[in-house]
Image (cartoon, rainbow, N blue to C red):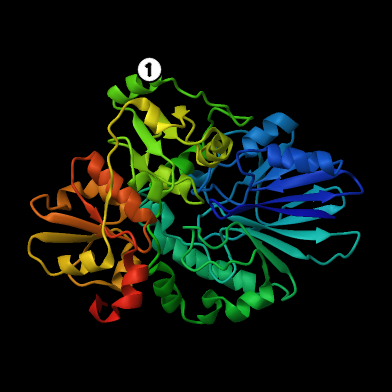
């Protein structure tokens, strides 16, 4: 058996290339959209991708299954579980609990594991030349290392009311099914630490059934379904806004993108024309560089591992946008964006100095300045971290407006007061500050945030 774990650290998303070397056949599970990775693996190992599978209709990324099928001619094997509302709306080989997929001398048994979503399935792999006992379980968003998939995404992100409680009950039953498997079976999940598909995912890429039964919180609620449900639904992170779009695009027929596109470097005239027409401009530079000089009305989303997630919060899928980035970054940034279906890049510029603007600067303040603003009646302190973070500890008097939903809550900013924002360590506050300025709101940014505040001034942190 050939096995390769393909990990996209920007979305904390795992996919799998598994092949039978004797037969030269391979299956890809939960493919990302820039499919050249899998084509290269197949070529380097003299294999043909003959099967493509998914564990469920994903909400956090746009899968590349259909792109990969178009290029390779491989068949797609997708869940037909979950009932009529949870069916893929394009041609595929439907899978039910107990079905077997054969890839050369390998076999993958379909195990229906609902909870995260009604149609979710896992794949139990047996390497027959070595043993007739299963050795690996590909769990998708069912069981992670140290955590399990959240059942509230459909309700919170896609607006499907009443689904989280039903999902929690299904998850409890699926966990019981998982616990009955042999302890030695390796567990390969669909996500790692940093994913919004759970709240406490481990950083190591894989585990075993036995280890999860000992260490994973979800297996400590035997005969206590209510306690399990309460803990599962509590303090889940805010699901990114783009999740609803991913649920739709992964289910319906859509245009395919089989290659990573190249985007044009805009001339000064092209950029200024788009700017005057109000096109959204994302400045991908480091937050410090941005703070020291930026084009008015641009939004600072750094081109780091969180780039795609924050673009998914801020950008409209129906509108074009421009990037400010070095040419050497464009392939990487394009890949990050195409993985969540943000394909409407109008072009890019790499030098803001040449555009003729009088550059603005951010008002970044120190801890001493921040202290002087606390408790003043003419100051509004805004904590732009997530709700669970805020509830765990916050600066006295601060209100909580999460960066991702700030655009929808601008009416809660008191423009008659001096506005001071902060997050944990500055990245989210940089986005929030640029967004507020774009909407005409002056703001001071305590960029060092709670990381510094809690270290030096614990006594003034409220719980």
Determine the image quadrant of residue 421.
Answer: bottom left
| Badge count | 1
Query: 399 or 183, which lies in front?
Result: 399
Reading the image, the residue beneath label 1 is: 269
* Res. 25 in view: yes
367 above or below 152?
A: below
Q: Residue at x 25, y 39 (%)?
A: 438
Element class at badge 1: helix
Q: Compared to 105, does 113 lie above or below?
A: below
Does residue 50 appear in this view?
no
What residue is at 61 percent from the left and 43 percent from the top? 32
Give percent across and percent down for residue 376. Answer: 10, 66
Quadrant containing the C terminus in the rendered view: bottom left
Residue 164 placed where, x, y %?
40, 60
Name the spot of residue 143 as percent of width and height, x first.
58, 65
Q: Nearer the viewer, residue 301 or 132?
A: 301
Left or right of 312 in this view: 75: right
Q: Which residue is painted at 92% across and 48% down in the image?
A: 22
Q: Position of residue 197 (x, y in %)?
A: 49, 58
């Amino acid at each position: 058996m050939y096995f390769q774990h393909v990990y996209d650290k920007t979305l904390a998303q795992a996919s799998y290339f598994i092949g039978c070397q004797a037969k030269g056949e391979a299956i890809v599970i939960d493919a990302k959209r820039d499919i050249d990775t899998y084509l290269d693996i197949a070529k380097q190992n003299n294999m043909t991708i003959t099967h493509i599978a998914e564990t469920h209709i994903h909400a956090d990324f746009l899968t590349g299954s259909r792109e990969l099928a178009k290029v390779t001619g491989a068949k797609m094997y997708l869940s037909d579980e979950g009932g009529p509302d949870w069916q893929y709306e394009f041609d595929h080989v439907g899978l039910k609990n107990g079905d077997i997929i054969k890839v050369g001398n390998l076999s993958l048994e379909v195990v229906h594991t609902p909870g995260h979503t009604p149609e979710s399935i896992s794949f139990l792999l047996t390497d027959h030349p070595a043993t007739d006992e299963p050795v690996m379980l590909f769990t998708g968003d069912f069981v992670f290392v140290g955590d399990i998939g959240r059942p509230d995404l459909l309700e919170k992100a896609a607006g499907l009311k009443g689904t989280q409680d039903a999902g929690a009950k299904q998850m409890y039953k699926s966990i019981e099914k998982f616990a009955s498997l042999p302890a030695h079976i390796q567990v390969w999940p669909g996500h790692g630490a940093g994913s919004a598909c759970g709240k406490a995912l481990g950083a190591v890429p894989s585990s075993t059934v036995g280890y999860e039964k000992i260490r994973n919180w979800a297996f400590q609620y035997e005969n206590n379904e209510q306690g399990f449900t309460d803990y599962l639904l509590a303090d889940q992170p805010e699901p990114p806004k783009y999740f609803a779009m991913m649920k739709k695009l992964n289910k319906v027929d859509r245009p395919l993108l089989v290659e990573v596109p190249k985007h044009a470097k805009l001339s000064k005239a092209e950029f200024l024309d788009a700017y005057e027409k109000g096109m959204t401009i994302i400045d991908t530079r480091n937050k410090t560089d941005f703070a020291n000089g930026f084009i008015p009305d641009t939004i600072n989303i750094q081109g780091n591992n969180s780039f795609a997630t924050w673009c998914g919060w801020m950008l409209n899928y129906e509108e074009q946008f421009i990037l400010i980035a070095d040419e050497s970054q464009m392939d990487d940034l394009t890949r990050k964006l195409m993985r969540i279906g943000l394909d409407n890049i109008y072009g890019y510029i790499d030098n803001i100095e040449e555009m003729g603007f009088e550059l603005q600067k951010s008002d970044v303040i120190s801890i001493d300045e921040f202290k002087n603003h606390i408790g003043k009646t003419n100051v509004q302190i805004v904590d732009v971290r997530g709700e669970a973070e805020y509830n765990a500890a916050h600066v006295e008097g601060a209100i909580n407006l999460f960066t991702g939903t700030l655009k929808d809550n601008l009416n809660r900013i008191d423009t008659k007061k001096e506005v001071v924002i902060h997050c944990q360590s500055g990245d989210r506050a940089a986005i929030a500050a640029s967004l507020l300025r774009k909407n005409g709101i002056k703001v001071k940014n305590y960029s060092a945030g709670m990381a510094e505040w809690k270290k030096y001034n614990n006594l003034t942190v409220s719980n």
